[in-house]
Image (cartoon, helix red, strand yellow):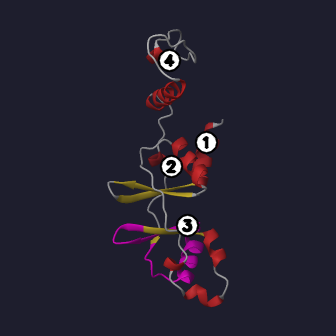
């Protein structure tokens, strides 16, 4: 709280703001910014992510995608063309296939087309917030326009569980 004119010991969690004029919302945002700036855990998404990332082209048959997921014991695969993410297919999406012949159709017919990406230096709590807000379980990690890893809901939960003691 020293940033706001507070004193006391290093772990002090309160202060009276006298020297800076803030409305309550601006003050809240400034406190959050200071916490993120001074966070002590040091862990980033780069520490949690898995790599390399499994990918398929948009024309890959759903049967092949399912087989890859089973063999690799994973729950999601990115759909990529020319190093650009076009979508993602996750286990849940297999529920869309109602007829046997659909397993021969390309993954582009069933993939989720809006894919949120995050940076490797992001704080795990920020990634968790995105997953909760958007109800998603996979976040590809992008650095300088390239996918370098992926973080899953399980990765995030395991990280927070390990911190709990």
Element assignment for label 3: strand
- Dot 4 or dot 1: first in sequence order is 4
Vertical arrangement, residue 22 with respect to residue 162, above or below? above
Q: Are marks 4 and 1 in contact (CB under 8 Å)?
A: no
Disc 1 is placed on an element classified as: helix
Q: Nearer the viewer, mark 2 or mark 4?
A: 4
Answer whether labels 3 and 1 touch (C-beta < 8 Å).
no
Magenta segment boundaries in residue numbering? 56-85
12 and 75: which is toward the camera = 12
Q: Is residue 94 above or below residue 39?
A: below
Name the residue at 61% across, 54% down: 154
Task: Mark 2 or mark 4: name the one nearer the start of the chain.
Answer: 4
Identify residue for label 2: 48
Q: CA distance from mark 3 to mark 2?
A: 16 Å
User: Disc 4 designates what residue?
Assistant: 1
Residue 2 drawn in magenta: no
Query: Residue 165 in the image: x percent, y percent?
Result: 66, 35
Q: Quadrant of residue 68?
A: bottom right
Q: Residues within 10 Å of mark 2 (few under 14, many from 20)?
A: some
Q: Find numbered disc 2 in the image and state the secondary structure of the residue it sits on.
A: helix
Residue highlighted by disc 1: 160
The residue beneath circle 3 is 76
Q: Disc 4 to disc 3, how far (Cα)? A: 42 Å
């Amino acid at each position: 709280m020293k940033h706001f004119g507070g004193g006391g010991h290093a772990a002090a969690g309160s202060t009276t703001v006298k020297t800076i004029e803030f409305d309550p919302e601006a003050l809240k945002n400034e406190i959050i910014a200071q916490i993120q700036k001074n966070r002590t855990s040091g862990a980033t998404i780069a520490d949690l992510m898995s790599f390399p990332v499994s990918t398929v082209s948009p024309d890959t048959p759903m049967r092949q995608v399912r087989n890859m997921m089973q063999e690799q014991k994973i729950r999601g695969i990115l759909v990529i063309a020319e190093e650009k993410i076009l979508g993602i297919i996750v286990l849940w999406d297999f529920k869309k296939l109602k007829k046997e012949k659909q397993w021969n159709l390309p993954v582009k017919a069933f993939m989720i087309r809006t894919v949120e990406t995050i940076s490797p230096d992001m704080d795990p709590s920020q990634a968790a917030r995105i997953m909760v807000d958007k109800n998603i379980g996979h976040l590809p990690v992008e650095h300088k326009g390239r996918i370098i890893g992926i973080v899953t809901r399980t990765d995030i939960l395991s990280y927070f569980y390990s911190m709990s003691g």
